[in-house]
Amino acid sequence: MNAEALLESQRVRREIREGRITGTSRGMAPGFVQCNLAIMPKAFAFDFMLYCQRNQKACPVLEVTDPGDPVPRKLAPNADLRTDCARYSVFVDGERQEDRLDVRDIWRDDLVAFLIGSGITFDAALERAGVPTDRNRWVLRTNRPTEPAGPFRGDLIVTMRWLTPQQAIVAAQVSSRFPFNHGAPIHIGNPADIGADLKNPMFGGPVPDMPRDQTAVFWACGVTPQSAAEAARLPLFIVHAAAHSFITDLPADHLMNV
Amino acid sequence: MNAEALLESQRVRREIREGRITGTSRGMAPGFVQCNLAIMPKAFAFDFMLYCQRNQKACPVLEVTDPGDPVPRKLAPNADLRTDCARYSVFVDGERQEDRLDVRDIWRDDLVAFLIGSGITFDAALERAGVPTDRNRWVLRTNRPTEPAGPFRGDLIVTMRWLTPQQAIVAAQVSSRFPFNHGAPIHIGNPADIGADLKNPMFGGPVPDMPRDQTAVFWACGVTPQSAAEAARLPLFIVHAAAHSFITDLPADHLMNV
């Protein structure tokens, strides 16, 4: 394949693999689906898949690789999941080890990779519909338990956006078109109704007082399964480092009908 | 729970369990989701779930039970999957044994049940939108391979409906609102484009010549995973008998946002 024929997603992944891009994936290869990555031994994969099925608004599984196969054959058939995220976090027995730039040397024949939809994916569609996405967004814990499966359990984690009431309506319409990528909001209005922890946001910085002309809108977040897998204290668990998602070759708008 | 408080789905399941309803589930408990049931040993459940994920338009998994647990805790928490279909088909090493009215005596602690969405579910929504559903519908094999996983593979099976062009448009709109229940059509127009086998329909009787004012519309069908599981020749595989689906307590319209 010559350089001219590369998709922007393929170009970015090559730059990552060759070490020329090392930072966040945010804003990279706009229009292509970015995924949360969760890699674990096959012994835990059935329970994890069950957990994702039972909590599918938080855990939309877009692809699962065969054991030992580092290639996501549907979403990016010439990618390598061991090298094509810019940064990985590795957990051993539930303890976070140092982050790595690739995971080739710890790859095993029994590892299964889950590619899970990310809310970032519909940002471009929101922007086109006039809904700003570049600020006033936080990832928060709630007190709503997820449905457990095997060792995987925990409270739902959500993305909160502050929008005007009109933007909130449009955002509900647009996100509903992405049912396999968190879909419609799970809540609109008072954060306390779902026990959203405004005091300790996981991402997005401190939450100020909300302006009177804004409404809080909440979506189930793909950090939920990652958090459940961390808490399960697996012997080995590998994820993309925060904000260093895996970039697929699937145009985001195609997710409306997969 | 007294009789007055029973949902129609619960009432019908009780009649089935007590042997007073033994026929098809078609037309029973209208408005409630009916599911295809697939039960197999846990040893095969991960590969089967992978197969369903990889072919999700044909195989929308709505619930998976814990091993040995015959209760679908989300979709019908007071049901028993061993008794609440009116008729079961049992396959041993890929050979179909006699059908059974219940499967209590062959239930095992390692059995996992998959509840898979059925196209019947959006019939009521189609009817409300003016699209007739009571005739001109067939289940057909195609020559389009599904994405394999482990021992599970086979060609896509589809539901074909004949509709007027206007009805076809409305049917595409309405079914798109049920992304977890086969969703939008996979094809409109010439059956030969997808190798649909009009000569040997699996259900619906012989296919006559199509009237000139009609259009053929095709949806991925939940018989696909059942057929793949039969072909995999599992040591034990239990399904609902054709047209004797499992009736859940979930209102079909709720499937638009699950």
Image: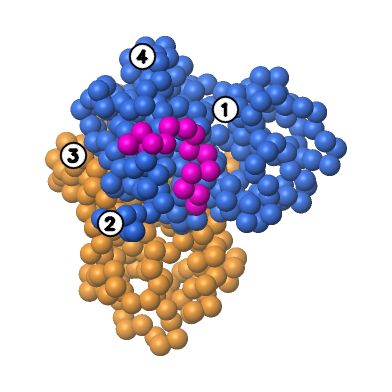
Chain colours: A blue, B orange
- Numbered disc in front, either 3 or 2: 2
Q: Which residue bears the numbered disc 3?
A: B234
Image position of B210 (left or right of A251): left
Give the CA distance from mark 4 to mark 1. Answer: 23 Å
Q: Position of residue B75 (x, y in %)?
A: 50, 38
* Mark 1 Cα-neighbour bin, 10 Å: few <14, some 14–19, many ≥20: many
Q: Which mark is residue A63?
A: none
* Mark 2 Cα-neighbour bin, 10 Å: few <14, some 14–19, many ≥20: few
Q: Same chain for marks 4 and 3? A: no
Q: Name the chain under label 2.
A: A
A27 w.r.t. A228: above or below: below
Q: Which residue bears the numbered disc 1?
A: A156
Q: Position of residue A85 (x, y in %)?
A: 39, 34
Amino acid of disc 1 = Leu
Give the CA distance from mark 2 to mark 1. Answer: 44 Å
Quadrant of the drawing holding the C terminus of chain A: bottom left
Q: Residue at x 53, y 50 (%)?
A: A178
Q: Which mark is residue A2?
A: 2
Question: Closest to the observer: A81 or B127?
Answer: A81
- Numbered disc in front, either 2 or 1: 2
Q: Residue at x 59, y 42 (%)?
A: B7
For marks 2 and 1 on the same chain, the one whose residue lies earlier in the sequence: 2
Q: Which residue bears the numbered disc 4?
A: A92
Q: Secondary structure at mark 4?
A: strand
Q: How many marks?
A: 4
